[in-house]
Image (cartoon, grey):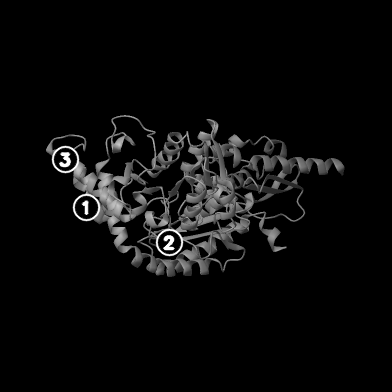
Amino acid sequence: MARIYLDHAAALPVDYRVFEFAKPYLTTLHGNPSSLHSVGVEAKQAVEESRQKIAKFIHAENESTIIFTGSATEANNLAVKGTALRNITSGKTVVASAIEHMSVLNPMKELQKNGFSFTTIPVDSTGIVDLNKLEDMLTKTTTLTSVMYANNEIGTVEPIREISNIVREKGMYLHVDAVAAAGRIPIDVQKDGIDLLTLSSNDLYGPQGAGALYVKPGVRLQSVLLGGGQERGLRSGTENVFAIAGMGEAARIVQEEITQESSRLIPIRDTLINEILKIEQSYLTGHPTQRLPHHASFRFSSIEGESILLNMDMYDIQVSTGSACSSKTLEPSHVLLAIGLKHEEAHGSMVLTLGRSTTMDNVEPVSKATYETVQRLRKLSPLDQEWRK
Amino acid sequence: MANVGYSKKVMEHFMNPRNVGVIENPDGYGKVGNPVCGDVMEIFIKIKDEKITDIKFRTFGCGSAIATSSMVTELAKGKHVDEAVRITRGDVANELDGLPPQKMHCSNLAADALHEAIKDYKNRKQKK
């Protein structure tokens, strides 16, 4: 049986067109963009061309709003710590939704240890941020509010425009982690009212090793990585020209194909969801309609997610889980707990993220493998009898 | 294929666990773990002349939780209870060619479940 890879939220293959485009920057066009000679200038041009493509991709004001980093984690760290520390005279309060990525939550926790106030905005059972609570929480001393465009574990798309209206009125800067959403749904930082936005190269089918932070003109930010002063002094370190050039080209291609690709994936996603929910005691996690086009996430009672992942892999189907046992911290996913699941419920999750390789023909074998996996693990489980009673 | 740092033997026991199920009217029963933590194991034993003649388990948990349960039933089957009670978590992990370090504690409760079942057997015997 052919491999069916459904873990596109974890890692994507690099688009072969992107690879062909960027390959020379590993070999023949190997210059350092900071060098003034012609080899350096060629590399510099590649970085600047990519900056323009990224700016266009998110409808930014101009290309100088884009700061390249080594990863999305680094961009999130720069957004959080860079704004909080630079704007300390305006206030020492930061807030984030309870379902943010760890690369937003952990820098905020670190700020908290250093005297900042940090609170999380609750979400409802579908993962949508509680707008009333947000409105109550924000003050003019809240220098940064961070809410992701869409969540990677439950696929829920947040009402970013409503959120940005609230932040503009009550708080200061809005940072949006768009790693899961970018390339799946259109993003317009100006219309959306976003001050800082995080992007990842690989999530656009670009090479790993590049991320970007959009910084709206006028937003005050300081560097968290000091050195030679690259990227307007905001991110020192020699640019990864191959990854950056690839990221720009990946964004250009993804943008061209976004409408076609999402209308191709949505029916596959919906058929998959319908088929899998036929399994007894199975539930969709996240929002039923405000959902990323490539995202289908579930939980099953009485069984555990790492076992689900390993069992699915025996069918050569790769999935993901928010189970504690598959994480480094051995804690169940904070996202699943934030939408109100009990620990024992959060253990039994399975996340499917579709991509360019996914077809409607995959639905049948994936649903069948899921059904058989759930049956087998429930037969092993002492908890199984409990819901049958 | 699957590789989360599990040995071939762990995967083999995960895919084809031995002695799965329930024994009606067991001579000893042990249950450890908690669904909140993500691991629950139960072991049923049947004893004749102080020897474990039959043993069955059911487990809710990750790959290593299932594999260690399967392995402990194999190790205990046919053994004298006083010998079986000396089977340790370390023995189970060794027989599986090792477990990833983060799994040594949380998902290696199978020996504990066996010990509980033997304790239960001894308690029942005393009451007779």
SS under mark 1: helix
Expressed as whole percent of the image width and height from the top left, the position of residue B40 reads 65, 48
Amino acid on which disc 1 is placed:
Glu
Extreme right residue here?
B128
Expressed as whole percent of the image width and height from the top left, the position of residue A370 reads 52, 62
Q: Report the residue at 35% width, 45% height from top.
A: A217
Image quarter of residue A58: bottom left
Amino acid on which disc 3 is placed:
Val
Disc 1 versus disc 3: distance between alpha carbons? Answer: 21 Å
Residue matched to label 2: A294
Marks 1 & 3 on one chain: yes
Q: Report the residue at 28% width, 56% height from top.
A: A252
Expressed as whole percent of the image width and height from the top left, the position of residue B88 reads 63, 35
Are dots 1 and 2 in contact, CB under 8 Å? no
Q: Quadrant of the C terminus of chain A?
A: bottom right
**Residue A155 showing in the rendered view:** no
Label for residue A41?
3
The mark nearer the N terminus, 1 or 3, is 1
